[in-house]
Amino acid sequence: MRICILYDCLFPYTIGGAERWYANVASRLVAAGHEVTYLTMRQWPAGQPGELPGARVVAVGPRMANYGPGGGRTMAPPLLFGLGVFAHLLVHGRRYDVVHTASFPYFSLLAAAVARPLAGYRIIVDWHEFWSRDYWNGYLGALGWVGWTVQRLCLAAPQRAFCFARKTAVRLQAHRVNGPVEVLTGEYGGDLSPRTPGPADPLVVFAGRHIPEKRARLAVEAIALARRRIPDLRGVIFGRGPDSAAIDAQIASQGLGGFVEAPGFVEEAALDEAMSRALCLLHPSSREGYGMVVVEAAAVGTPTILVDGEDNAATELVEPGINGFIVAQPDAALLADAIVEAHRLGQGLRVSTADWFARNAERLSIGCSLARVEDSYTAL
């Protein structure tokens, strides 16, 4: 089949969960003998081609920064990407049997839907997230209704919908997505073999972009409170972003410099090493479409602490007391209590977490999800 994948970023030029997902989708389809074209924004130096082994990479928009100073997506790149996709599909749409796109950043999906009657391809949409109206209002303030309306318009496109959480599937169906919905259960591409975790260091790890919804500053506060009961406790706050300066100031002002560090982004091996010996992963994010980092932590026997919330689908990956804890609200004292409990349970909780991963490894694997996506192409 002739397949066109739409996403405004391309791995490894930019690194993120969706980028990895579409690179893996493309590789799987190429290996199965399909003809794959990948439409994206340019993320490489001018005059050079974008590279994705076996696939044809087409830049339909210029190189631009996707995120503004506050950590949110800027408007111009999605609009230009949508226009570029629309122009490409108007000219070349008939050469594709299937267009496979992310729902976000929306305008590319709308472009594919508008061009579809002229080209006749089928549309597959990955809904990595479906934001609630309250979240849109918090994200865009008075313009929240605009984001909500555009997201709702995307539901009207005739599509086969995939998502990565039951919470997302329920929302899609409640708002009458125009097509069948299937929940994919995994994106983990690491080693699936069972392992016995070693004893943990008194270390709490946070890993994520330093943007408001990830709540890294709350993680620092919780570590400081837990340290009052675990005197040798340390913390490491991986990642960078708009909140990084405030986090550095928070660590300095509270006298945590000798116990909490914020080294920024590090090599994957360094992150894996810290994660494998951590007491727990502290991930107080308000919004997650899946929660890959929870699976990555469980794979090395490290439990995760989450905060419950209507936009946090990562809670579907934690069984309280088995592979981590879910606190009821974003409160530093509650998070500190969970850290202390993870410390009290010690090796028993780490073994339980590793057992949970071993039981669920196959369904959590990206191979399982990719096989179901490939089957969908055959059905089409």
Image: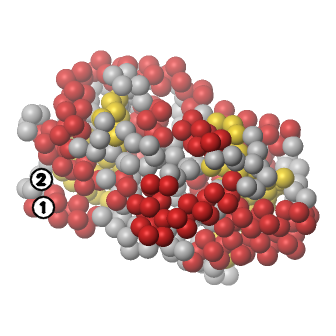
Is residue 165 found left or right of 236 in the rendered image?
A: right
Query: What residue is rendered at 72% in x and 75% in y?
Result: 84
Whole-Å distance between the Cαs marked 1 and 2? 6 Å
- The amino acid pointed to by label 2 is Leu
Q: Position of residue 43 (x, y in %)?
A: 59, 72
Q: Position of residue 27 (x, y in %)?
A: 72, 49
Q: Out of 245 and 269, give the one closest to the viewer.
A: 245
Q: Quadrant of the C terminus?
A: top right
State yes or no: discs 1 and 2 in contact (Cβ < 8 Å).
Answer: yes
Query: What residue is rendered at 75% in x and 48% in y?
Result: 178
Q: Position of residue 47 (x, y in %)?
A: 67, 81
Q: Out of 172 and 112, give the one closest to the viewer.
A: 172
The residue to which callout 2 is attached is 256
Is residue 56 found left or right of 22 in the rendered image?
A: right
Query: What residue is rendered at 25% in x and 48% in y?
Result: 219
- The amino acid pointed to by label 1 is Ala
Q: Is residue 82 visible?
A: yes
| Tag of residue 159 | none
Query: What residue is rendered at 91% in x and 59% in y?
Result: 120
Is residue 54 found left or right of 182 in the rendered image?
A: right
The relative height of residue 317 versus residue 286 in the rendered view (above or below) is above
Query: Under tag 1, what secondary structure?
Result: helix
Q: Position of residue 245 (x, y in %)?
A: 25, 67
- What is the crowding at mark 2: few (fewer than 14 residues within 10 Å), some, or many (at least 20)? some
Q: Is residue 51 visible?
A: no
Query: Under tag 2, what secondary structure?
Result: loop
The residue to which callout 1 is attached is 252
Q: Out of 289 and 280, give the one closest to the viewer.
A: 289
